Image (cartoon, rainbow, N blue to C red):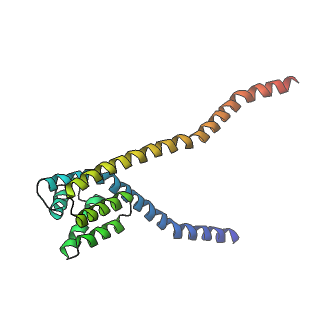
Amino acid sequence: RKEWLYTDIGSLCVGAIGPYWQLQSYAQKRIRNIQRALPSVVDLMVLGLGAGLDFTAAVRQVIEHAGRADEPLVEELRLLLQELQLGRTRRQALQQLAERAPCEAVRDLVASVMQSESQGTPLAAVLAAQAIASRQRRSVEAEETAAKASTSLAIPLALLFVSILMLIVSPMVLALAKRF
């Protein structure tokens, strides 16, 4: 009877926490996809702005010519356009984008666009600088991940070395123990 109780409690905990972990994993994957796609999307927006389009038309062009419509960044940009069509200001729509996609790259993009709008600086130049900064940030993050991977591999490699050493040395120790 007690075994069933422990099993039921364990199942209850996994059933309660499992969906949360799964949603967190899905959210993190979505954020990584957005961060990965952002520099190229910003470059496309810069091309559109350089061709004479305004911000909304440049975003629309990116959405229309996106490779896959189900990419997270394309979905977020589509929501941004819908909010603009509903009558929200660009500032409000961009702030909603930053809330829906809570990553540093999107927050920086939103801040840059809002700052460009408030100061009257050319948006294309600001977005081009933003794309470069986003690529550099991604490169630094990749280097940090590689550094963490090398340090995290040290312990398993040490354990592997110790186990191989024990496999080699233990027969010799056993043979010496039999002699004495």
Height in image: 55 above or below 163?
below
Q: Is residue 76 visible?
A: no
Q: Is residue 146 visible?
A: yes
User: Between 50 and 119, which is closer to the camera in this rendering?
Assistant: 119
| 53 left or right, relative to 40 | left
In the displayed orientation, state which residue is furthest to the bottom: 87
Residue at 23% x, 59% y: name it.
69
User: Between 161 and 49, which is closer to the camera in this rendering?
Assistant: 49
In the displayed orientation, state which residue is furthest to the right: 180
In the displayed orientation, state which residue is furthest to the front: 119
Residue at 20% x, 77% y: name it.
87
In the displayed orientation, state which residue is furthest to the top: 179
Quarter of the figure with residue 165? top right
Height in image: 30 above or below 13?
above
**In the rendering, at what x and y percent does residue 7 appear?**
62, 67
| 46 left or right, relative to 112 | left
**In the rendering, at what x and y percent does residue 154 appear?**
59, 39
**In the rendering, at what x and y percent does residue 33 appear?**
34, 55
| 19 left or right, relative to 13 | left
Residue at 25% x, 55% y: name it.
126
How many marks do you count on the picture? Answer: 0
Residue at 31% x, 69% y: name it.
95
Quarter of the image that includes the N terminus: bottom right
User: Between 6 and 55, which is closer to the camera in this rendering?
Assistant: 55
Quarter of the figure with residue 81? bottom left
